[in-house]
Amino acid sequence: MEAYLDNSATTRCSKAAADMVYKLLTEDYGNPSSLHMKGVEAENYINDAKKKIAKTLRVQDKEILFTSGGTESNNTAIIGAAMANKRAGRHIITSSVEHASVLAVMQFLEEQGFEITYLPVNHDGVISVEELKNAVREDTILVSLMHVNNEIGAVMPIEEAGAAIKEKNPATLFHVDAIQSYGKLEIRPKRMNIDMLSVSGHKIHGPKGSGFLYIKDKTKIKPIIYGGGQQKGMRSGTENVPGCAGLAEAVRITYKDHGEKIERLYGLRERLIAGLKGLEGVTINGLETRESAPQIVSASFAGIRSEVLLHALEDKGIYVSSGSACSSNHPGVSGTLKGIGVKGELLDATLRFSFGMFNTEEEVDYCIGVLGELLPVLRRYKRG
């Protein structure tokens, strides 16, 4: 049996999305900037994709900018806003547990003379809205926060944060990394005071290399890619029409019977947590309740290195992660796990399990059964 439980790293592309990509690569392959019918057809796919996506957020079509995925969306939002607003101030706020595609950008901006405030998180992985509000100043031009933590599934109080930011300084822009929350939690940018929102296609069963950035109309932001002026000059370069249309198809499927899909994910998560808690020497990191995201479970296994357990599970056809896939090329201690107070050897004994729409209860039960067999063996091996 195979159980792919690493959907926060990437998901299997749905057949409908993959078929759409293939169709646009082989049949409707025109360049949207071309004036002939092939070009017009391609442009129609782009416009239709914007409509489908905008509808899920209740925003305007023109506020959707297509990108190559989450990393580019985060880079565009943060660097673009920083460069456009630096005369108003050079202070930016983020959290200490952000994804590498945010933290690395913050380090770059520090080198450019910006001042970055990194907010700590509590034991559940959540920032204090009061601390955030106190950190906002007259020269704060941007706040960037993730909605769902990619390692432990902690949900940041985005709506309360947005209200606090705008109350303290209405001119401060609010960017949200929604890469792990889009399609999983309700997101209403207007109500939540969100000015920019990043999304990645391959986290919702869409094609890799697809994504979008919501940019509220009239937001002051500069492009970071220059050229032929596509997408109203905000992202030059021929649009990835197959990726955009494939992403829109994934969005359509994700939001069809959406409530039922989320309920299924919560059911799988709760089943896994219950099974893990029945095993010796296992600690669940973050909240076990529905205050957490529906698709992520982080667990520490005392006495076993995460890499050893990961490969032992892989041998049984079970695929999990030892942290963020984007950080696996730069191994080190997880800032999130340290931030929530995970101690000692458990920092290197933690795995992330994450669900998608193709997972089943049988896969969860299989995973728990295999862990029940593996853990005592691996612990004995270590003692020996």
Image: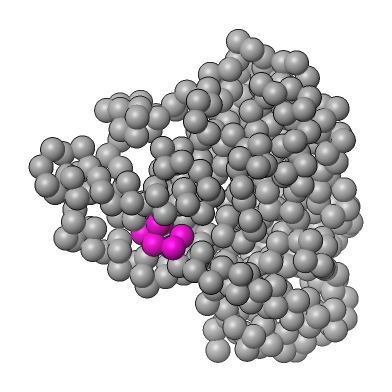
Is 253 rendered above or below residue 53?
A: below
Which quadrant would residue 342 be assigned to in this image?
Answer: bottom right
Where is residue 235? Give x, y as percent: 38, 33
Residue at the limit of the structure toward the top, as seen here = 87
Residue at 53% over, 59% down: 203
From the top left corner, tell me how far across and down residue 130 is, in percent.
Answer: 87, 35
For this rendering, which residue is in front, 238 or 258?
258
Say which quadrant the N terminus sits in: bottom right
Magenta highlight range: 246-252
Q: Is residue 249 magenta?
A: yes
Magenta stretch secondary structure, dominant: helix
Where residue 177 sits, quadrant-wise, is top right
Residue 306: where, in percent of width, then height? 73, 67
Q: Depth check: give the residue in front, 10 or 270.
A: 270
Q: Which residue is drawn at 30% across and 27% down?
A: 229
Q: In which quarter of the image is the C terminus?
A: bottom right
Residue 244 located left or right of residue 253: left
Q: Looking at the image, is 301 positioned above or below residue 161?
A: below
Q: Where is residue 221 in the image (x, y as percent from the top left)?
A: 51, 24
> Residue at position x 11%, y 47% from top?
37
